């Protein structure tokens, strides 16, 4: 039979037989079969995402906190203090006025035991206005003889051993030989040749080699006193200067710059019957109080005192060009004991109240003791 297409009918199919897949032999190798290529891994199975409300909140990222303990804070504060002090030190070192006061010359006394400072208070009015001169009662330059003179001259001897430091006043009217200018009052040397001639005059008169020099003028002295808020002083008797008109009442009080200047210069009053001898004693007394107050914690830890002091000191002081700030610190440290009997305070022994002539025997004993760092004999101490 044929179907509609004219083809013979297909025989009925039996159950479908599956042939096992055979590997085709690799040409040239009998019995070897090609290994099936490795299956590439498919994408990882997907997981059903939880509902939005079921997602747990993620923890915030952990940040490392810097902890500043007491040790670090203290170290930081200490570093700031050290840097501040270093800055102040450098500022003062390069701001203080300097002068070539110490010179070598034939016949200059040889260096001996200890260290000697020449401390000078000049009557310089440099930088003062007319109002300043009136307030400080500086007086007329021409009436004083013209030029610059020294109202205050002291030798501060700092020993190398355990003997007391010594502060010796040189009365301004002392008659001495001024190199190249004959005999005159010792304070005239400053007006004739400035600091170098004054140093040379003092060295020749005393036989002591001067190692350091410090000078302060009228205005600088008053400014330093005002910078620390005044200096506490006890005055035994009212001081009324008949020449300048300055009056300082009796009793313990705080002297400002103008009053302090009047106190250390006064010699024409009932309270200073020995004239210049009483004046130099008051000068040593005031310097002791001034140095002690500057070195006190009440001044150094009070910014309202220490900053004005740092501002006033460079313009007020003049030192030798070879001197440095650490030399001044050493001087102040040694002199801090003036008011507590830690420093021997005396005047060059003189023959009369006019203080024009030195006692040759006693003054020689004094200067030899300083030169050799030995105790000053009682007979050579004059107050």
Image (cartoon, rainbow, N blue to C red):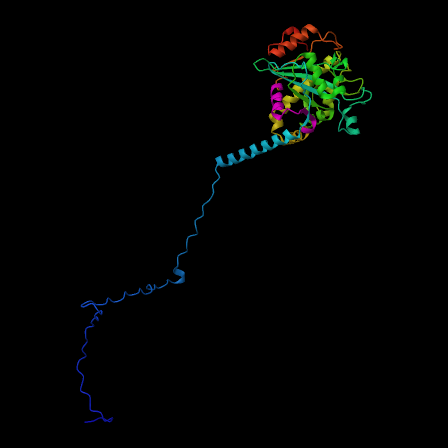
Q: Residue at x 58, y 31 (%)?
A: 86
- The answer to whether residue 82 is above or below residue 375 is below
Picture quadrant where residue 273 is located: top right
Tell me where residue 104 appears, x and y as whole percent: 67, 18
Span shown in magenta:
314-335
Quarter of the image that includes the N terminus: bottom left
67, above or below 49, in the image:
above
Residue 132: x and y in percent read 77, 28
In the image, taking residue 56 as reference, residue 39 lies left or right, namely left
Of residues 145 and 279, which is closer to you in this image? 145
Q: Position of residue 296 (x, y in %)?
A: 61, 24
On-image quarter of the C terminus: top right
Q: Nearer the viewer, residue 378 or 68?
A: 378
Image-based side of 265 in relation to 40, left or right: right
Residue 212 visible? The answer is yes
Give the image quarter of residue 248. top right
Q: Left of 182 or right of it: where is 333?
A: left
Q: Where does residue 355 sit, x and y in percent of width and height?
A: 74, 10
Is residue 254 at all visible to an observer of this figure? no
**Residue closest to the eye, 326 or 335:** 326
Q: Is residue 350 magenta?
A: no
Instruction: Classify residue 168 by image quadrant.
Output: top right
Residue at 65% across, 10% down = 367
């Amino acid at each position: 039979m044929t179907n509609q297409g004219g083809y013979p009918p297909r025989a009925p199919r039996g159950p479908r037989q599956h042939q096992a897949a055979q590997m085709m032999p690799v040409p040239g190798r009998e019995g070897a079969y090609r290994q099936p290529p490795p299956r590439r891994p498919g994408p990882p199975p997907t997981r059903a995402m939880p509902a939005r409300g079921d997602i747990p909140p993620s923890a915030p990222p952990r940040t490392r906190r810097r902890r500043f303990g007491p040790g670090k804070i203290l170290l930081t504060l200490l570093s700031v203090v050290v840097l501040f002090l270093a800055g102040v030190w450098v500022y003062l070192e390069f701001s203080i006025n300097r002068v070539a006061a110490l010179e070598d010359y034939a016949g200059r006394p040889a260096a001996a035991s200890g260290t000697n400072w020449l401390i000078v208070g000049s009557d310089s009015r440099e930088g003062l206005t007319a109002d300043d001169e009136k307030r400080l009662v500086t007086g007329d330059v021409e009436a004083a003889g013209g030029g610059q003179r020294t109202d205050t001259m002291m030798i501060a001897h700092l020993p190398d051993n355990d003997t007391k430091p010594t502060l010796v006043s040189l009365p301004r009217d002392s008659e001495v030989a001024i190199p190249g200018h004959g005999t005159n009052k010792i304070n005239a040397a400053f007006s004739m040749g400035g600091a170098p001639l004054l140093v040379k005059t003092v060295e020749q008169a005393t036989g002591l080699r001067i190692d350091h020099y410090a000078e302060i003028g009228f205005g600088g002295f008053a400014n330093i006193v005002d910078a620390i808020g005044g200096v506490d002083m006890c005055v035994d008797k009212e001081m009324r200067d008949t020449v300048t008109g300055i009056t300082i009442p009796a009793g313990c009080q705080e002297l400002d710059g103008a009053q302090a200047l009047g106190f250390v210069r006064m010699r024409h009053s009932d309270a200073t019957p020995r004239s210049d001898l009483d004046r130099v004693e008051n000068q040593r007394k005031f310097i002791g109080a001034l140095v002690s107050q500057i070195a006190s914690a009440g001044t150094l830890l009070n910014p309202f005192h220490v900053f004005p002091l740092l501002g006033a000191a460079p313009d007020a002081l003049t030192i030798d060009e070879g001197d440095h700030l650490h030399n001044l610190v050493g001087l102040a440290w040694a002199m801090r004991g003036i008011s507590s009997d830690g420093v021997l305070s005396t005047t060059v022994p003189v023959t009369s109240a006019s203080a024009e002539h030195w006692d040759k025997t006693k003054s020689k004993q004094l200067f030899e003791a300083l030169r050799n760092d030995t105790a000053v004999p009682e007979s050579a101490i004059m107050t």
